[in-house]
Structure formats: structure tokens, C-alpha cells
Amino acid sequence: MSDPTQTRRRRKLGFGLVALAAVITLLVAGALLGPATGLRVDADNKAAASPGSGTGATADSRPTGLETITTGDLVERQDETGTVAHGDTWTVQIETQGIVTAVPAAETTINFGDTLIEVDAKPIMLAEGDVPLYRSLNYQARKHLKGPDVEQLQQFLLDAGHDDSERLKADGDFGLSTHRAVKAWQKDNGREQTGTVDRSQLVFNPAPVRIDTSPRVGSQFSELSVTEASQRVTAQFAARQQAFVEIGSSVELQLGSGEILSGTITETTSTVSDQGDRVVEVTIQPDTDLPSGTERLKVIASNVAARDVLIVGVRAVLALAGGGYGLEVETGNGTDLRAVELGAVVDDQAEITGQFAEGDKVVVPIDLLDSASEDNDEEGTEGDDQ
């Protein structure tokens, strides 16, 4: 079965090629343009309407239609296949022995304050912190323990509602208020009220995690593996497409169902593909959670080729007899052939400059439109049969 996005791209490309081919054909037959359009063009390519010129049909009885000049951005698009993952897998540093009595299912996200696993019916919880729990934390009368790990513990206790009657502060100093709050937390979780916290009770991590593999309930605890909780998408773009994938750029993520979500590029790395080509590997953070089970999707990146410009379809562009290009503009009393400068061309749209304004209507040969439509239908039929 064909990819619907690829089919649409083939249709757009096919349409653009037909239109451009028509421009080239007109360039070859440029000397006939004056009579064919009912217009005259002087030696300097300055055009003026000949008597009786107008829209609807040209002098050679070629039926025409009208297209409106618009203002906007010309945006190029490039799509590649992306792979969904959750980053690296690692083993949580839990120091305990016993029987696994409860554990969340694989792929479950564990947030701060949630239980990672229960061993001997005692929960081991996740707390927010950049500094790992590298030492036992407890009250020492002669010299208080101090540091960012203590502050992390205090903030965890406050978030859990253990504030020692509002006397606890997250100041990084393990005093009596922290000691009492720890014992209250231990009591609530069925633990011995020692006032000491270690890696058999709590794990610090900068972000929530996702259970990678669940140990079997009833087995002897050995280890617990997790991944990052947030999803990430990776894709490779050709090195020449660097402008499409700058860090901070927004991209579209198209699911297999056709649904379009958004994401932000967070990292780019220049590397070599398995085929030996120089590529840019991008990492994308989805703006919303992707559906469970999503493994692959289409990453659609954009690049603005021209911003806030006048735009017209390339099918309206005519080749002038003396060189250059022109547009046949409706004036209300007929039409006027005006020279045009072409800028960026994206698919079937072109940036133009000259004596034009947004809202001007230009003449387009209907047979060119019909030809393009027929070719597009053929392309679509071929794609559907694949």
C-alpha cells in the first residue's frame, strides 16, 4: 500500500513539473505570445493591452481562467521516517534484599512521589533531585548533615505533606524538624521509624522514569531497569537539508492513522548513515504524548524559502518574446501583460516582484490546468496501486 503523504508529494511535484514544462514551451514559442494573448509587447518588454484584449478566450481561442495573486510565505517541506524511543535504559540504584511484593507494569511512568517497587511490602519511592542519594541521611546532633541532597529530601517531605507542623524548611540543613518529618513519612509507609533515609527507601532522579522491565512478583529482588519517561523521536535528514532541522524548530509528526501532532527539535548531530551518506540526525521532543505502541511515524520539517512575498502559481507565468517572463493581469477593461521577476519557486508556487499587488487576478490557460489535473490523477492512481 502506498504512503498517502508520498502520493500527495508526487501529485504536487507532478503538477509543478507540468506547469514548468508549459513555461518552457511558451519560452520556445515566445515570438507567438503577442498574437496568442491579444497583447502587444514592445522591444523593452513593456506590455500594454491591444484593442479588444480580455479574458475568457485568447486570440487563438485558447480558453483561460483567472488566479488571484496572494501574499504569504513560501514554505518548503521535507519528510523522513522517525523512530520513537525513550532514551537510554539504566538500572536504578536500590540497595535492598527481599521478595518483590508489587511492581508497576512495564512501560508505566513513575512520577515523583510514586512507588518504583515494593520489596517485602515496603515501598521504594522516586523523588526529584539532581544529586543521587549517595549517603545515608540522618540527624547528627554534634554536626548537622548539610548539602543539596538534604535539601532534596526536605522538599520531597514537604511535597508529601510532612512539614513537622510547618516547622520544616527546605534549607539543606538536616535538623530536628527534618528528623521528625522523616519519621512521620516512614510511619505512613509501614517502615521502621529510624529517622534515617537511604537507597533502600528512596531514589533521587532529575525526571520521572518509565519502567522498562518488571521483575516478577514473588521473585527475589535483584534489580529494576528504567528508561526516561518522556518520548523522543529520532530521524535522519540529508546534510544539505540542515536549514530544515535547526534546534528549536517545530516539526509535524504524522502518525500511521494520518493524525498530525507537533514536536520540537532538541538536538542535532552530524553523522554518517548506514549507506555512507553524510546526514543530520535529529532528536525531537513531542509536544504531547504519542499513542502507546507508536514505534514509527513520519517527521515533516519545513523551511521558509521566502517570507511575506507576493505569490502566484507558476502556471500563470508566460515567457516573453524578448526574454524574461510576464503575467497577464485583468484590469477590468481587458488585460495587461506585465513583466515579472521570479524569486523562490516551491512546488507550483512562485515568488514574484513587479507592478503587482495582492488580490490582482492573472490569466491562466485552462487547458494547462486540465492537463495538470489529468497527470495528477494518473500519478495518484499509480500510487494507489502500489
Image: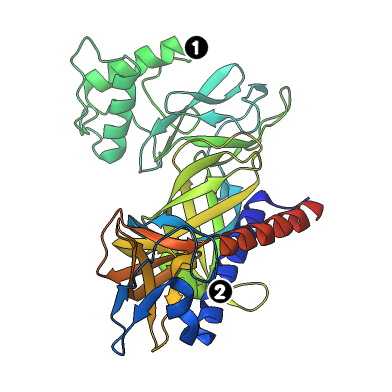
Structural distance between the alpha carbons of marks 1 and 2: 81 Å
**The disc label shown at residue 89, or none:** none
- Furthest residue in direction front, as rendered: 51
**The disc label shown at residue 22, or none:** 2
Camera-side residue of 265 and 137: 265
Colouring: rainbow
Is residue 33 depicted above or below 292 in this figure?
below
Is residue 198 depicted above or below 256 in this figure?
above
Q: Secondary structure at mark 2?
A: helix
Q: Is residue 297 left or right of residue 183?
A: right
Which one is in front in this view, the residue at disc 1 or the one at disc 2? 2
Could you tell me which residue is drawn at 81 percent across and 53 percent down?
385
> Residue at label 1?
190
Camera-side residue of 47 and 103: 47
Q: Is residue 276 left or right of residue 319?
A: right
Camera-side residue of 35 and 188: 35
| Badge 1: residue crowd in 10 Å (few <14, some 14–19, many ≥20) | few
| Badge 2: residue crowd in 10 Å (few <14, some 14–19, many ≥20) | some
